[in-house]
Image (tube, rainbow, N blue to C red):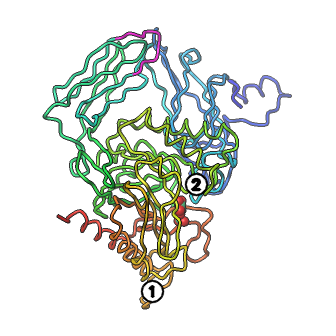
Amino acid sequence: RWQDRVIADAERADPQARFEFDLQRSPVTHLPASWIGHAPAMRHYQGLVWYQRTFDATALPRGKRAFLRFGSADYAASVYLNGEAVGKHEGAFTPFAFEVTGLIRTGSNRVTVGVDSARTPASVPPPVTDWETYGGITRPVTLVTVPETFIDDAWIRLTDDGRIAATVRLNGPARDLPVRVSISGLSFELRGSARDGVWKGSAPAPRALRRWSPEEPILYDVRIAAGEDVLNDRIGFRTIEVRGHQILLNGNPVFLRGISLHEEELGRDPVRAITPAAARALLSEIKLGLNGNFVRLAHYPHSEVMTRMADELGLIVWSEIPVYWLVDWSAPATLDLARAMLRDNILRDRNRASIALWSVANEPPPGAARTASPRALSGDVRAPDDTRLVTAALLSGRKGKVATIDDPLVADLDVMAINTYQGWYTPDRLADLPGFEWHTPLDKPLIFSEFGADALAGYRDGAADPHKFSEEFQAEYYRQTLAMARKVPFLAGMSPWILKDFRSPRRQHPVYQQGWNRKGLISETGTRKLAFGVLAGEYARIRDRP
Ligand code: GCB
């Protein structure tokens, strides 16, 4: 399918020729998109789809290099240009780029991509998840042209001791180029010369620097120049650290008033097309509607559009890789894959001030064998990024009304995080929830990274003891769970499950779910349920307390 030929021409030239395929006469679609956006019947298709298009390129000037960059492809992709294989990638949520300098032609070029959405138990994530697999080329594809030696990576940040630091990595034959980092509006500049393709520099942050925060999400225009290459970015500067059981933003304790979010836009038929407008609509519900300052981007790295919008709107972000439920770690390649995802997520996003937490796992099942891999991942974070906190969403032990944070992984984390569903997945009465006690032997901050209950928007039940799936039940569940949360002295934040009802093929209750997980505080079309107001009220109270 990736041959560089026009099938109709081949058939005309040789009337005996027959092919199993003809991509040039296949249905046309617009990318980025997911299977379900191509055709509703493809919603649950798990397997291979071929894409092909031609594009014109002007002659690549001497000394320039060209790359094909994919924002993401779900789940595995093989890329071909003009009949030649250029590379493969596994993992649905991180970007990848292949060099095509020697292959790109002046004039017409043919790019062919096979995308396979099927996963195995050793995939990350494994086949069973509680969300939709949006197979396809779900984020933009770009042809990037750069100088022969270019800035491959530039990490610009504020350090805990008040300096602005830059690490710049070059790719190409010139290893010792002059490097210059400047921040407009601050008359700040760092200059130096790369050694063997790497340059590190720092200087005290100017007094005039205004730190990024949810209240003042200030971003600066930063210019990074090395040799002939220039990168421009918009970057905020802040510090995030832990002291005892507190999280400190810019040195001050902050309580994370958040909610979880899947990468799925509002509307009756989402296709996972995260435009700036779609991201703004979702994140504004959190920031303005819920009085929030925090979002857990579950359960995988979201589109760059989302993290950039969080920077702009002022929301602290939890970012995670899809180490979810039952990953089969028996093949060493699986841990390598998860490590690559974590690294690529960090490299993509470490200039985003909004991101405060890297999460390495969600509800890994108990057992020594499964702890080893998340533990290795938590150890990986600090080398590429020592300016953020490491966490993982775990389950707790329980005896009667005492819950104990006893997962051995917490010892490796900066911030403990617990998913808890008492009163929804357990027979506990809602009125008993405030009587729960939380224990931990460690002096670390805790986030309730999930709690929630399903409600179908519009299903109202005015009885004294409302039914599950009613808006009243969900609202009461929130009231009682929040009453429990208020009594946890080491609680530093929460991201209940979840802002919006989201597609999940495993949620098939014929009346209440019909393919949607209904734990949203808003419906898929944005209707706010009663519990929305309960959480918004609690967050206003926390925000305004002296
Ligand atoms: C969880 C999972 C999340 C599910 C949620 C639920 O613990 O982390 O992915 O969607 O519970 O609704 O059961």
Q: Amino acid at mark 1?
A: Asp
Percent across and percent down for residue 316 are 33, 50
Q: Residue at x 36, y 70 (%)?
A: 532
Q: What residue is at 29 percent from the left and 45 percent from the top? A: 312
**The C terminus is located in which quarter?**
bottom left
Q: Is residue 201 left or right of residue 282?
A: left
Q: Mark number for residue 358?
A: none
Q: Mark 1: few, some, or many residues within 10 Å (few <14, many ≥20)?
A: some
Q: Nearer the viewer, mark 2 or mark 1?
A: 2
Is residue 80 shown in magenta? no
| Secondary structure under the numbered disc 2 in the rendered image | loop
Q: Secondary structure at mark 1?
A: loop
Decide: is 325 above or below 382. Answer: below
The amino acid sitting under disc 2 is Pro
Q: Where residue 147 sits in the image (x, y, percent)?
A: 42, 15
Circle 2 is placed at which residue position? 364
Rendered view: 340 above or below 478 = above
In front: 336, or 416? 416
Residue corresponding to mark 1: 461
Residue extent of the magenta highlight: 169-177
Q: Which residue is rendered at x = 28% and y = 25% of the image?
A: 223
Q: CA distance from mark 2 to mark 1?
A: 36 Å
* Residue 71 seen in the current view: no
Residue 203 location (% of width, % of height): 23, 25
Any part of residue 421 in sight: yes
Residue 170 position, x and y percent, is 42, 18
Quarter of the image holding residue 84?
top right
